[in-house]
Amino acid sequence: MLRAARICPRLARHHAQWRSVTTSSSIQTPHGHLPSTQSPIISELKFFNSVTGDGTQIPTYRVLDGGGKPIEGAQVPELDEAVARRMYEQMVQLPTIDNLMYQVQRQGKIPFYMTHYGEEATLIGSAAALALDDEVLAQYRELGILLWRDWPIDALMNSCFGNCEDIASKGKQMPMHIGSAAHHFHMISSPLATQIPQAAGVGFALKRDPARRGKNCAVVYFGEGAASEGDFHAGMMFASTIPSPTLFIARNNGFAISTPASEQYYGDGIAARGPGYGVHTIRVDGNDVLAMYNATKEARRLCIEEGRGVLLEAMSYRVGHHSTSDDSFAYRGRQEVEDRKRLDNPLSRFRLFLESRGWWSASDEEELRSRLKKDVLAAYRRAETLPRPPVSEMFDTVYGGEEPWTITENREELKRLLKKYGQTWGPWQAELQKHKGAGQDLMGS
Ligand SMILES: Cc1ncc(C[n+]2csc(CCOP(=O)(O)OP(=O)(O)O)c2C)c(N)n1
Ligand SMILES: [Mg+2]
């Protein structure tokens, strides 16, 4: 009473109205008198801090053990031999490309590269479970998805070198900022997590499109570090409140450059956040390609059938440095990395499984490795010798539609400078020779 007497008249009026509504016999709420929740009423004063109910961590779904044997009760997916072999081949292709491109960057031939070591199963297991025309919005460490969709290695090399055959960006993007509209893989952009709310929008667009509704979903990949951005929450919120078939795949590889995952969250990883948004959620052993395959397939089914978001957290370990701009031994021990590689290697786990089925042999392995090496090397050599795009290309297709005046001014300015210095100043002369047309497309016009 005392308290009621102290509150302002407007609030007192509100309280009186509220009392009359909640005591009215016409209101039938099954759980008492709380208008915005179906929550049961209890008398025990109790806080909670776990989504499992009993305080334990969210479990991790797994099919194969470390020796490639199905664990008790696990459902092995019905993959035929050809698909299973292709999955393994694609997994091996990733480190083959990474080994070469890392060296190529070290030789100064490309400015940047990012490896996928340790995440081969996360990438190929999920890629194989998606439809080829599901819309993928990725972060930057997801080359495996595009390769699974038959994006040629030549295309990757051309984009790393930014040469005249780099179809997607004509040399405008950094290496590993890949994309291909034909492969339903949206162009990577550097600012972390921007792809997450965009994916919820793409999912919504799919839902509105009669030709794709119930057929496709949007799939967004992001690291556990990116999940600390506000955009993660915005994306989850969109997909949950404006329901859209959006599959969120968090690659929890333990690091965001030098920040360990333990400093990225205090709760139970990324998966614990899903139920907060009313989103179906699963945590998966990301080093187990069959677990990733099964979980992604089911997540995709849920997404499409219910037209709602689903969250999958793939647990793995980033074996490589963050990128060629990073030396991870400045913040983690060499031994830790060696131990992880030895104890839980996604490639050898799957290879042992294939061998146990009689689907793989030592000679298959030898043949594969030498074939992949040859193919990757050939693509690299081709890309390295191709010239850069004509200089004027850098201003084209930056924006769709009408060209903004800033681009027009930039082009005119460069034309003026090239005319002044392009044929007399050594460094510019040398740079121009690397471009198709040696700058004549601008200087001559
Ligand atoms: C908004 C924004 N902040 C910071 C960066 C710099 N940055 C690039 S990658 C990265 C770490 C991301 O880690 P994670 O999301 O876990 O992905 P991983 O590299 O482990 O695959 C950071 C901080 C950025 N690109 N964008
Ligand atoms: Mg990470």
Image (cartoon, rainbow, N blue to C red):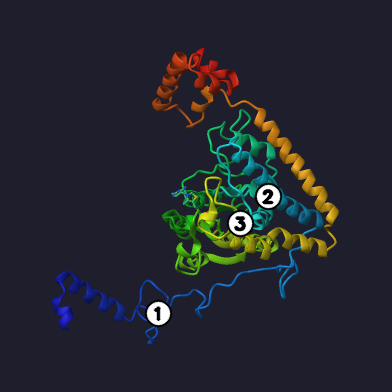
Q: Is residue 410 above or below residue 293?
A: above
- Displayed quadrant of residue 7: bottom left
Where disc 2 sits, the SS reads helix
From mark 1 to mark 3, how far is it between C-alphas?
Answer: 38 Å
**Mark 3 surroundings: few (<14), some (14-19) or many (≥20) residues within 10 A:** many
The image position of residue 63, as x and y in percent, is 70, 68
Which residue is located at x 82 percent, y 65 percent? 356
Which residue is located at x 14 percent, y 71 percent? 9
The image position of residue 311, as x and y in percent, is 55, 62
Respond yes or no on whether mark 3 lies under 8 Å from ligand 1: no
Whether pointer 1 and pointer 3 mark residues with C-beta atoms closer than 8 Å, the reply is: no
**Mark 2 surroundings: few (<14), some (14-19) or many (≥20) residues within 10 A:** some
Give the mark, 2 or 3, whose residue is nearer the N terminus: 2
Whether pointer 2 and pointer 1 mark residues with C-beta atoms closer than 8 Å, the reply is: no
- Displayed quadrant of residue 246: bottom right
Q: Which residue is mark 1?
A: 47
**434 or 244: nearer the viewer:** 434
Mark on residue 175?
A: none
Q: Which residue is mark 2?
A: 95
Q: Which residue is mark 3?
A: 319
From mark 2 to mark 3, how far is it between C-alphas?
Answer: 11 Å
* Amino acid type assigned to the residue bearing label 3 in the image: Val
The image position of residue 43, as x and y in percent, is 37, 87
Residue at the limit of the structure toward the top, as seen here: 444
The image position of residue 428, as x and y in percent, is 50, 21
